[in-house]
Image (spheres, rainbow, N blue to C red):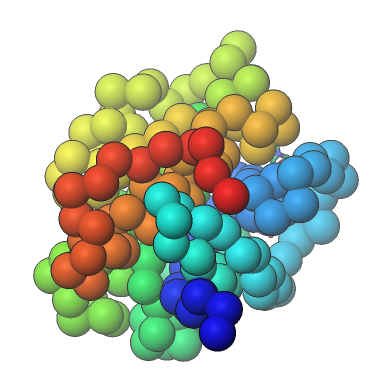
Amino acid sequence: MPPQRKQRKIAIMGYRSVGKSSLTIQFVENQFVDSYDPTIENTFTKPWKVRGQDFELKLVDTAGQDEYAIFPAQHSMDMHGYVLVYSITSVQSFELLQVLLEKIMDMTGKITIPLVIVGNKTDLHRERVVSTEEGKRLADTWKASFYEVSARSHESVCEIFNRLITEMEKADGSNGNEKSSCVLS
Ligand SMILES: Nc1nc2c(ncn2[C@@H]2O[C@H](COP(=O)(O)OP(=O)(O)OP(=O)(O)O)[C@@H](O)[C@H]2O)c(=O)[nH]1
């Protein structure tokens, strides 16, 4: 019998136009799409291997949120983890994460949720308005992992998912002490 793939569902959330789709597509298809096409919602499936364990990842690329959006209830039900994305070029997108984190905690009712906070668009360093320290501080407050990445240059994109899977396994009670690595599959 072939080894079983563990099915894991991940929501990619954040403000409009921060690069949620670009990060997801970069991870799933290894390509960067330059055009901007606002997402309603897309689900991608990606087989992925972390330290000998096969996973089938369901990545839910959600519609851009703002502070007034009602948190979609379906995104609080069966998610194993969240990738919360802001753009380092937008204070508004960074501030939204605080609101989104509170909503996630509220809606899921869980104390510990596997979370990765991602500052995207590091290639636009001249337009940076959110510092790395601010990003780290937010992640520390929420006991989340933190990465700054660029979907455009594929910088650090797979680390996001490796880290999240490690956190999800920890929450599950397995592989808790393993370090994440990007050399996979
Ligand atoms: N320079 C640069 N541009 C990026 C990067 N990631 C995304 N973009 C651009 O930002 C715009 C929005 O990207 P999307 O991936 O569609 O953003 P989104 O968060 O999915 O947007 P919504 O679906 O509206 O919520 C597009 O023009 C992308 O090409 C990045 O790392 N660097």
Residue found at the very far front of the displayed protein = 1
Q: Is residue 58 above or below residue 170?
A: below
At horizontal 25% and vertical 46% (from top left) the residue drawn is 178
Q: Nearer the viewer, residue 79 or 184?
A: 184
Q: Is residue 141 left or right of residue 147?
A: left
At horizontal 47% and vertical 23% (from top left) the residue drawn is 129
Quadrant containing ligand 1 reads top right
Q: Quadrant of the N terminus?
A: bottom right
Give the tally of numbered discs. Answer: 0
**Image x and y of residue 185, in percent:** 58, 50
Residue found at the very far right of the displayed protein = 35
Q: Quadrant of residue 31?
A: top right
Q: Nearer the viewer, residue 40 or 7?
A: 7
**Image x and y of residue 107, in percent:** 28, 81
Q: Is residue 81 left or right of residue 35?
A: left
Q: Nearer the viewer, residue 39 or 70?
A: 39
Q: Is residue 152 above or below residue 25?
A: above
At horizontal 75% and vertical 44% (from top left) the residue drawn is 30
